[in-house]
Image (spheres, grey):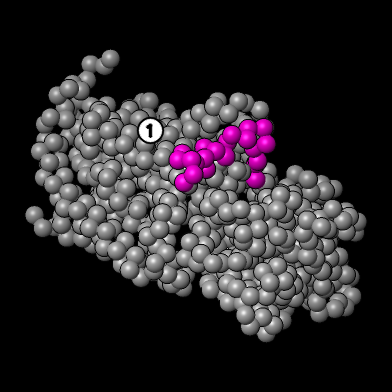
Amino acid sequence: MERKKFAGLVAAGVAAAALALAGCSGGEAEDPTTQPTNTGGGDGGTGEQPYVALISKGFQHQFWQAVKQGAEQAGEEFNVKVTFEGAEEEGNVEQQIQLLQTTLDKHPDALGFAAIDSQAAGPLMDQAKQQGTPVIAFDSGVDSDVPLTTAATDNLAAAAEAAKHMAELIGHEGKIALVVHDQTSVTGVQRRDGFVDYMKANEPKIEIVDIQYSGDPAKAADIAKAMINANPDLKGLYGSNEGAAIGIVHAAQELGLPNGKLVIIGFDSGKDQIDAINSGLMAGAITQNPVGIGYETVKAAVAAIKGETLPKTIDTGFYWYDKTNIDDPKIQAVLYQ
Amino acid sequence: MTIDHEGVAPAAPPRTEGLVARARGSLQQLLAFGSLIVIIVVFSVWSPYFFTASNLVGILMAATVVGILALGTTFVIIAGGIDLSIGTGMILCGVMTGVFLTYWGWPLWLGVLCGILFGGLIGVINGLNIAFLKIPPFIATLGMMLISAGLSLVISGTKPIYFPDTPGFENLMNWSVIPGARFPLGVVIFLVLVVVAAIILAKTIIGRYAFSIGSNEAATELSGVRVRKWKVTIYGMAGLFVGIAGVLSASRLSSAQPVGGMGLELEAIAAVVIGGTSLQGGRGSIIGTVVGALIVAVLTNGLRVTEVPQEWQSVVVGLVILVAVYFDMLRRRGA
């Protein structure tokens, strides 16, 4: 019995020490490469440097890491402290709301925000407005009047561009299917609708046989395989984000399809997609300008802090890239590994 | 090795109870297996593309990772415990395998072996927390689940880890065993593990003690079995399955993705429960788990192939789980 008590004491001691340490460091998911002119978290804008907090939809896909990069670049350039956090699982609304709450309570000088679910974020947007924290929306943005501007890709136009290339590559007729990364966020909806609407308006001989949803590469692979098996005459597959596109590529590989049998078009970049395009597995993809998104968000935040007026939207641009132009420096600048 | 009455203990009360319980378990398995056949028939009729070689292999492949997790966790549940950390733990094992093979440049066999052993380590830590620190399994493994999720991100720097130095790695899951046809090695490994797990459960002391501890822990302890030690062993062994799942999952995507896994533990537990293993412990079987895992995989795939809107897919799977557990309860009340 003494041994049990001792073990219990040790465990309690360790737990207490861990809590104390966590308390001291402010518990932020701060990346060590953030400019450390000010020390650790909890310091809501009382220091010399203005503090801009960005909350994104996710952390995992390299896309968000590129946005973070752009944000940090702007942070250095304009001399502001920038933090970048995201929900661990893209689609985890609950987690993002918690994150948002905690961040707002720190009273940053400005907030950058990309909502997983606009409705859920509504009340906190109002709180930001009340406490005088300017909000700059980015990427999906948020469906609310509170943000002063939205720095994002025009996803509807970008998806239409993807559809245009898909149509060309399959000869303007045949069956295609979509794997969309999610049903609730604005980007998911827009990247699906932009594609679907283009096809409806311009390509009567192309039939979309199915649309299924997952941004997780393994699940997307299983979904794509099921769709391919269910439609042996399928000519093309469109994946609306990095995870979905990678899943489709793996599905084609697992089924042993020869290059070009299926026209695969993706979105964003990441090492897997870039490799797939170079090897011919994927026909091409639409890249956003994630570094630009991060950069413009922080830049707009700085302007907002100074009280300048901002345009309603800031279009950060998109490009189609494939084997022929992937080495173009303009394209290389917006791709990420 | 010890002076426990190891040979005597399980022969007493737990076993007779176990026999009756196991007979009831068999009925559930029959029900589960029958349901599986029915579901397959329904989908085959509904869509001509369902019962094709390519699609069936696809189902097995989709079932492999969750299936392996379910195999390991069957032991834990039979022993009266639960392990919520298997999903994120699997991801962490994948990441660690990436560390071993890519960051530290180890040879393929060593990195893979250590990735699997790392899963065992996580399991042992869970077991120690549960058996010696007396933290309830739900809490202990919940905590471990969160720790694993975080560590995966920290260690990988939130980037996927690729395997450029060991190109053979992706073959573990993907290499086709039958040249010409597509029968991935990963599925073969799963089937082999099914046999291994069945043997361990039915024929070895780990299996017997799992049943014994699950049906009556106090009696087992009193008959001289070192329950705490065996709990650690059971969780540790289940952890090896997590490690294997982690390696295969990373192999499939040729990269250790640092996020994901959350939710897989529930899919695995659902498979175990549908297959007739009781969450109360003391009863269960490997074949039941396999049938449960197949039911979930067949349902999910069938609904996709017949293009049922995705929103309905999880509704259907959820209903199946409810029905399965309900029948489980009915059976136990019926005597």
Image quarter where the N terminus of chain B lies is top left
Residue A147, picture quadrant: bottom right
Is residue B166 located in the magenta-colored stretch of the structure?
yes
The chain to which mark 1 is attached is: B
Residue found 75% across the figure and 76% down from its top: A157
Where does the image place residue A279, in percent across and percent down from the top left?
A: 71, 49
Where does the image place residue B91, in percent across and percent down from the top left?
A: 53, 44
Residue found 62% across the figure and 66% down from its top: A236
In the image, is residue B211 above or below residue B57?
Answer: above
Residue found 43% across the figure and 34% down from its top: B240
The three-letter amino acid code for the residue at tag 1 is Met
Number of labels in the image equals 1
Residue that carries the numbered disc 1 in the rendered image: B237
Residue found 43% across the figure and 43% down from its top: B187
Residue A168, picture quadrant: bottom right
Is residue B61 located in the magenta-colored stretch of the structure?
no
Range drawn in magenta: B160-181
